[in-house]
Image (tube, rainbow, N blue to C red):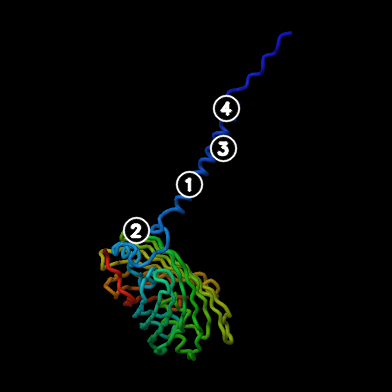
């Protein structure tokens, strides 16, 4: 009896195991390559990935280009080395709302901001204190000077010699009692639109917690910086009619800067403040403002000039519109002299 020839296996079926084997091997090679990349990243030099090892570790010009860059008008210089004091003075012209008693007449506001920051570890860990005051003259209402509540904060930052810095902080606005008349309250509503991201410092007996995170990237003469945070406020006194016990709002700031020359930098700052829980119409929850600026970088002084312009609705729609000019001066207090270069 003749033997039966074995059935012929199609070529595609014979190639299937080879294809599966090739696929498995390629996956393994991809995982191995990824593992090697991670190992190479972990073994990179500390100067490229670790936090700054301290003064004098890099040439002075490299350290200045990466860490001592011009600060935005409102945001801090993230990687400061020395104690600093920043003073800001803002003058604003305000157009009140049509429903206000000052409708049709121009109001004026002045805002002063002082901030002292001390590095616990240079370029890494910082503590600071902030205090504000505001004044306004509203025709037909009143003129008044108001003091804000102090804020204490701490922050930390991780930095790379490649120009990337990131970190975060936590501030607490300490509640201070104040006796504000109805006329002064309207003056305050007018003045606080000038600096809407710090409005919580002017609330009566209100404890506010302010967590945030920071990011900054420097590439050549370009500077990109971002701050995003939340304000959680708690009223620690008896509630007034229509008042909430707690309030939450978000704020975001983005800065794009360009260093024209060693002593001069220009930039544009964009702010958004969003009321998350307050009972407001949707078209009044978000507040936007832009601020073009120019900063001069001197030895231990950095003056800056900027203007502040609203986009769409000012804070809560309390006023119709405004525009402001700002003078900001940062003072550095070196604690020691840099080591001599070899």
The mark found on residue 149 in the picture is none
State left or right for residue 95 relative to residue 3: left
Which dot, 4 or 3, sits closer to the camera?
3
Q: Is residue 240 above or below residue 340?
A: below
Q: CA distance from mark 4 to mark 1?
A: 31 Å
Residue 257 rendering spot, x and y as whole percentages: 33, 64
Counting from the top left corner in percent of width and height, residue 221 is at 30, 61
* Residue at the image point whose x is 48% and y is 44% from the top: 33
Q: Which mark is residue 24?
A: 3
Lower sequence index among marks 2 and 3: 3
Q: CA distance from mark 4 to mark 3?
A: 14 Å
Mark 4 lies on residue: 15
Secondary structure of the residue carrying numbered label 4: helix
Secondary structure, mark 2, is strand
Q: Quadrant of residue 252?
A: bottom left
Numbered tag placed on residue 36 in the rendering: 1
Instruction: Between label 2 and label 3, give the one nearer the viewer.
Output: 3
Query: Which is nearer the N-term, disc 4 or disc 3?
Result: 4
* Element assignment for label 1: helix
Residue 158 % position (x, y):
44, 64
The answer to whether the residue labelled 2 contacts the one labelled 3, judged by CB atoms less than 8 Å apart, is: no
| Residue 254 visible in the displayed image | yes
Of residues 107 and 144, the one drawn nearer to the viewer in this rendering? 144
Residue to which mark 2 is pinned: 219
């Amino acid at each position: 009896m003749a033997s039966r020839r074995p059935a012929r296996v199609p070529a595609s079926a014979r190639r299937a195991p080879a294809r599966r084997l090739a696929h498995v091997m390629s996956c393994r090679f991809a995982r191995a390559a990824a593992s090697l990349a991670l190992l190479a990243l972990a073994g990179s030099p500390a100067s490229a990935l670790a936090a700054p090892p301290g003064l004098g570790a890099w040439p002075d010009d490299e350290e200045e280009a990466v860490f001592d860059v011009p600060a935005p008008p409102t945001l801090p210089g993230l990687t400061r080395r020395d104690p600093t004091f920043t003073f800001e003075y803002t003058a604003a012209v305000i157009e009140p709302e049509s429903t206000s008693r000052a409708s049709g007449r121009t109001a004026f506001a002045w805002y002063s901001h002082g901030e002292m920051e001390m590095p616990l570890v240079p370029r890494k860990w910082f503590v600071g204190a902030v205090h504000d005051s505001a004044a306004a003259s509203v025709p037909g209402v009143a003129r008044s000077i108001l003091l804000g509540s102090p804020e204490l904060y701490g922050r930390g930052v991780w930095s790379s010699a490649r120009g990337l810095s990131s970190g975060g902080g936590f501030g607490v606005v300490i509640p201070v009692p104040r006796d504000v008349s109805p006329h002064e309250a309207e003056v305050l509503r007018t003045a606080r639109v000038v600096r809407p991201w710090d409005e919580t410092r002017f609330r009566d007996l209100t404890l506010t917690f302010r967590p945030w995170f920071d990011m900054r990237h420097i590439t050549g003469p370009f500077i990109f910086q971002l701050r995003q945070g939340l304000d959680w406020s708690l009223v620690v006194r008896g509630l007034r009619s229509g008042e909430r016990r707690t309030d939450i709002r978000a704020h975001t700031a983005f800065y794009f800067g360009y260093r024209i020359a060693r002593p001069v930098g220009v930039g544009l700052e964009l702010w958004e403040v969003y009321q998350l829980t307050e009972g407001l119409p949707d078209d009044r929850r978000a507040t936007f403002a832009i601020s073009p600026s120019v900063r001069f970088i001197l030895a231990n002084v950095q003056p800056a000039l900027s203007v502040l312009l609203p986009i769409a609705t000012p804070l809560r729609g309390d006023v119709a519109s405004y525009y402001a000019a700002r003078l900001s001066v940062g003072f550095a207090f070196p604690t020691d002299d840099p080591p001599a270069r070899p």
